[in-house]
Image: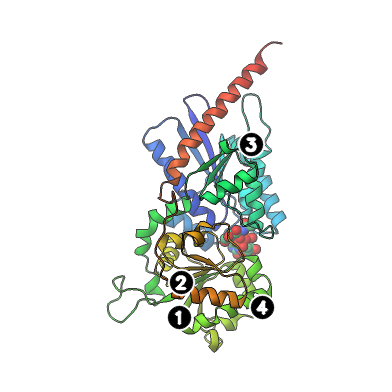
Amino acid sequence: MTPNSHIKILMVVGARPNFMKAAPIIRAIGKHNDLGKAPEIRHLLVHTGQHYDTMMSDRFFVDLGLPKPDMHLGVGSGSHAEQTAEILKKFEAALSQEQPDIVIVVGDVNSTLACSLAAAKLPSAPHKSRPLIAHVEAGLRSFDREMPEEINRVLTDHLADLLFVTEKAGLSNLRHEGISPEKIFFVGNTMIDSLLAFKEQAHQSQILDQLGLRAGEGRNGSGRPAKRYALLTLHRPSNVDECSSFQEVLEGLSDLTRRTEIIFPVHPRTRRRIEEFGFERYFRSVANQQADQRIQGIRLIDPLGYLDFVCLMKNAGLVLTDSGGIQEETTCLGVPCVTIRENTERPVTVKHGTNVIAGTSSSGIRKAIARQMARKVKPCVPEKWDGKAAQRIIPILISSARKQFAACAVRAEAVSQPI
Ligand code: UD1
């Protein structure tokens, strides 16, 4: 950045849960520039390619109105080390080429950590510092180091210069880890910015009709209310990668399947495990009409785009998940949520929201479902989950870049002084 000129930002996305967190920031940057505010923000979108299937990536660009990535690193799948290393190498080259003032990373996926690490290790020159690293969704902790996401969160937060926090627990977590309070900003939740921005559009989705989930007979269309159904997502390695753990979870759902239909948009990881473990009998899909009679209600469908998924979530009687973000979205929508995990890094969804932590045993899952079916829940809006998180982030980025520039100018001046 030069005084009164522009700030250059690289925004990183890589995997499905990143897209809805990044979209509001890109929109807020566009608005800032359209209003002719200074400094101009030049912005490049970098897709690492961690997720690459149409339904895990491209469809979200369409649904969320995201611009086409300016750079695609095309890293694809691999072990954690392979994927992280590949992103590190390719993102370092992108940084050297583009020389941004700020790198923004979101969430807790391998792309988040790898890009922060590449940026943190760039050498600073007297007249140009390494880019500032901004982490959106900082401070969340499950305190479970078995989760790859927890490692990504902790390390990214310790590399970041600007930590944008979604809920108050994040503030105390970062304080306990000794992170300087000047770096920490409680701004709200950009994923909820997306939810609020697209909720009405999601209402127009045809997915309920496509899946035959409208109640009653009569005219086709969105006038009729939804049938009662539950929505399931499962993809955590700890739930689906081990045959016995996966089976335990499926057994925990067996009572519910007798009472209600369960719709399961299946992640590619989980689909592979279903085939590998020979679990097809648990599911009803076009390919398998011979499902086990006890649990035939679980209906397997392909992964969905953002608008269709929000529509299914909004109309569901119950959501069952091991995702992080869905716990937050259901809280805002006032839909009861059963989290099939031993912990959550998002405690506000349990304390004030609609979420219960079931654990991963079949008895724990059954109990949590029974509790949620009997409970009356209402939408809850945690503090600052008001659709304005991205708006709060932009001025902080600008003032931090200005400070960085001023510090750099002082350093360059000192270096140029004759001894
Ligand atoms: C990643 C994130 C997780 C996030 C999830 C959302 C990490 C450590 N994990 O997990 O936090 O909740 O995304 O989906 O970053 N695959 C495809 N097509 C794709 C992407 C993946 O077929 O577009 C397959 C690959 O074969 C891969 C497997 O799914 O081996 C898992 O993908 P990966 O990106 O490694 O992790 P996720 O389980 O998706």
Q: Identify residue for label 1.
A: 260
Going 52% across and 25% down the picture, which residue do you hit? Answer: 2
Question: Which of the two residues, 55 or 254, is positioned nearer the viewer here?
Answer: 254
> Which callout, 3 or 2, points at the residue further toward the start of the chain?
3
> Which callout, 4 or 3, points at the residue further toward the start of the chain?
3
Q: Identify residue for label 2.
A: 318
Count neighbours of disc 1 (C-alpha within 10 A) and say few if under 14, some if 14 to 19, many if 20 or more.
some
Can you give x and y, in whole percent of width and height, for residue 54 in the image? 52, 61
Can you give x and y, in whole percent of width and height, for residue 336 in the image? 45, 68
Alpha carbon separation for disc pair 4 and 2: 27 Å
Instruction: Locate the C terminus and report the quarter of the image it occupies.
Output: top right
Q: In this picture, is 82 found above or below 187? A: below
Using the image, tell me which numbered label, if any, was put on residue 96: 3
Going 66% across and 67% down the picture, which residue do you hit? Answer: 238
Q: Is residue 307 visible?
A: yes
> Which callout, 1 or 3, points at the residue further toward the start of the chain?
3
Count neighbours of disc 4 (C-alpha within 10 A) and say few if under 14, some if 14 to 19, many if 20 or more.
some
Question: Which of the two residues, 89 or 413, is positioned nearer the viewer here?
Answer: 413
> Which callout, 4 or 2, points at the residue further toward the start of the chain?
4
277 displayed left or right of 21: right
